[in-house]
Amino acid sequence: MQSNGEGQGQDSELSCLNSAQNGESSSAVGTHSNGVLTSTNNGNNVGAGLGSGTCVASTSSGSEVGSMKKKKLLSQSEEDVIRLIGQHLDGLGLNQTVDLLMQESGCRLEHTSATKFRNHVMEGEWDKAENDLNELRALMHSPNAIVRMKFLLLQQKYLEYLEDGKVLEALQVLRGELTPLKYNTDRIHVLSGYLMCSHAEDLRAKTEWEGKGTNSRCRLLDKLQTYLPPSVMLPPRRLQTLLRQAVELQRDRCLYHNTKLDSSLDSVTLLLDHVCSRKQFPCYTQQILTEHCNEVWFCKFSNDGTKLATGSKDTTVIIWQVDPESHQLKLLRTLEGHAYGVSYLAWSPDDTYLIACGPDDCSELWLWNVPTGELRTKMSQSHEDSLTSVAWNPDGKRFVTGGQRGQFYQCDLDGNLLDSWEGVRVQCLWCVGDGRTVLASDTHQRIRGYNFEDLTDRNIVQEDHPIMSFTVSKNGRLALLNVATQGVHLWDLQDRVLVRKYQGVTQGFYTIHSCFGGHNEDFIASGSEDHKVYIWHRRSELPIAELTGHTRTVNCVSWNPIIPGLMASASDDGTVRVWGPAPFLDTQEVDGLNENCSNMDS
């Protein structure tokens, strides 16, 4: 973090006031206008206008120097803190307190020229504000910025004249002051068009400007300040900015943080470091769904988070309704007749349809209308096909499907074949957001991108072991792979690099499906052959939680995309477990507030 010590050469004025030695003196030291220091001797002002850090003292014919006790010399960081506090108090309107703080510390909030400039801008005294710029020029690192600052001033002046109906004065500013600057001519053309506005409301609407007044002038000052060193004028609301950054950094480092980041400081306490308890994380079994009567091979929440679909070896798909308040699941309907069992499910983008696929020897897929429970399409191109994976095109009108026997089809909602790709032994599929490209993992331990429009394909990912399944993040940038004997790998699809290998999970040659989840998809969860569910923070290779309860291989984990504290897992033990925060969570518990985020208790 910078110490805001820029410009110290010209502005050594910002160091602390050093008072004279112990003793009495006839001089009096005072401060006005938030720390402008003055000193008088027999009524004569001898210190006015000195820099804020200049030691201010006066002598009186041989007497001891100074009337105040000698103060401790402040470091640069201590000065910065005092100025930050002063700026914050000033923003709260505590002006007398600010004056006292600056007097006692011997520091000054901002340069005298900056104070004068600020006052003139806020009062709309544009000619005086322009003159102030000449004083500020010597204090700036980039003198060329004066032209930009003058442009911003004149633009405000021009708009205020227009709002007041002073068209001739506005025209004079445009022609005689703005245009000669020869800066941002495109903007000047736009400004000239505002002369045609019929009334003030029309002007404000077209300019998206608040109009003449305190708010727009404060915004102008915020823009002007960016050209001034912090030693001359502090950035606006600097203390709040630093505190917000600190809170965001603490949240970012918190392994269990799983809620939306609120940028308002009012939503947090500044008196304690931010820490999320593991009890607030979906590590606890909330429900065990036992309606399936055989191995459960797959589970997937709908895109809107209101339903969960589970597929089983028992030939059924069950649709579960998620209660929006309690987050409890109840059986909505059962879809039957999948003779080979259901090993994969895919919701359409609008959640109207659900496609069910079977295991390797299944040549059929079922497309169900979820609201009605009716079968829209039962598709099979050939009895020799293996349709084990499916992915929806973003338009919701097409899907791609394929399997390990070398078939790769694009179809419409009625199962009609639109395109096909021969000889591709597909293990898993994903449609990219461009609507043209399909990612497919194949038996060559790779993921390739296939473009159905120009019939081209290219390598995206190459692994050294079979890719059993993969999924892609919402933004399409990251891919999560379950790799045989290797576990869970994270790839960057854009840069085509392996980002991270997550540790802990037992992954052999069973097909296990992992997922992104939590707020902003900061977390990764996967089943495992050791009967556990593993959860990692996306940037950490070690698991932050190992969830126990299942008694056989966990085949699939799905994280609710809308409710970040809700997760489901499907297992060969015939159950679906629903995971959530600890029941009866008391967020005020001391142990909850102070719990270590790396706690691995299950």
Image (cartoon, rainbow, N blue to C red):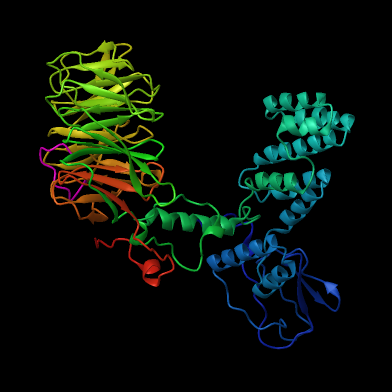
Splitting the image into 4 quarters, where does residue 486 fall? Answer: top left
Region rendered in magenta: 502-512
Splitting the image into 4 quarters, where does residue 401 fall? Answer: top left
In what quadrant of the picture does the C terminus appear? bottom left
Give the left or right position of residue 486, taking residue 269 as reference. left
Q: Is residue 538 visible?
A: no
Q: Residue at x 20, y 45 (%)?
A: 527
Give the left or right position of residue 325, taking residue 123 as reference. left
Locate residue 163, reporting x and y percent: 83, 35
Please name the predominant secondary structure of the magenta segment in the image.
loop
Splitting the image into 4 quarters, where does residue 399 fall? Answer: top left
Q: Is residue 63 above or below residue 539?
A: below
Q: Is residue 505 magenta?
A: yes
Q: Is residue 464 visible?
A: yes
Q: Residue at x 21, y 46 (%)?
A: 575
Query: Which one is in front, 173 or 327?
Result: 327
Give the left or right position of residue 416, taking residue 340 as reference. right
Locate residue 177, reporting x and y percent: 80, 32
Query: Which one is in front, 339 or 211?
Result: 339
